[in-house]
Amino acid sequence: MKKELPPLSAAIKRVRKAYGDTQEAFARRLDVAMITISRFERGTEPKDLRVLLRLEEAARMINLTAEAEAFARATIEAQRGRASDDFNRPFVNPSTYTRVAGLRAHSLMQWRLMAAARTASLYFPGLIAGIEKAAAPALEFVDGVIKNASDAVPVDYAALDQALDDLAEQRALAALKGKMK
């Protein structure tokens, strides 16, 4: 009894056959190894974004819309998976953090949240009340730093940023010491 191929594997085989290519010729067309095409057609579904995009393009070139859409959906899922894996991974060089509105992001998740809050404050003002409610504990922390800052005009955002970092590090260290006792 022949095992049914996963949907992407079957789509790859249909696209290759529509071109009239051997596995070797199709591999050259996609700029991958022939063994890769063989694996795909035996049931290993592609996860590599580059390969998925090439498969989508190959299917669209010969008007295999259903297959092209399947590859496009797989590409989106692969991107989502990669993004979620990266959320808590620190940036490669922690001494060069990405800045969003003067704040340092230590990971993709932090950058995402900061960018969303900034975008909401600029372009979706109706969301601000909900964000403030959801972020109340963090805002108390930030408001404490603002309250202790000087009344310098213009506002020294770099100093506020440094004070916030210092306070956060102090609290994190205190919490760590508390756990060690």
Image (cartoon, rainbow, N blue to C red):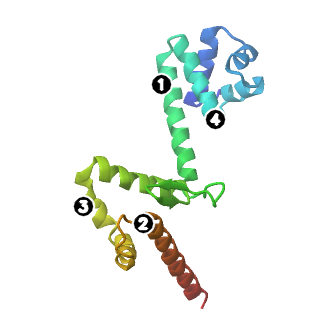
Residue type, numbered disc 1: Glu
For marks 1 and 3 on the same chain, the one whose residue lies earlier in the sequence: 1
Question: Residue sitting at 46 percent across and 72 percent down?
Answer: 164
For marks 4 and 2 on the same chain, the one whose residue lies earlier in the sequence: 4
For marks 4 and 1 on the same chain, the one whose residue lies earlier in the sequence: 4
Q: Nearer the viewer, mark 4 or mark 1?
A: 4
For marks 3 and 4 on the same chain, the one whose residue lies earlier in the sequence: 4
Name of the residue lying farthest toward the left? 126
Mark 2 neighbour density, 10 Å: few (under 14) some (14–19) many (20 or more): few
Indicate which disc residue 129 carries: 3
The Cα–Cα distance between marks 1 and 3, rounded to whole angstroms, is 39 Å
Indicate which disc residue 156 carries: 2
Q: Quadrant of the C terminus?
A: bottom right
Pinpoint residue 75: horizontal percent, then vertical percent: 54, 33
The Cα–Cα distance between marks 4 and 1, rounded to whole angstroms, is 16 Å
Residue type, numbered disc 2: Asp
Indicate which disc residue 69 carries: 1
Residue type, numbered disc 4: Asp
The residue pinned by badge 4 equals 48
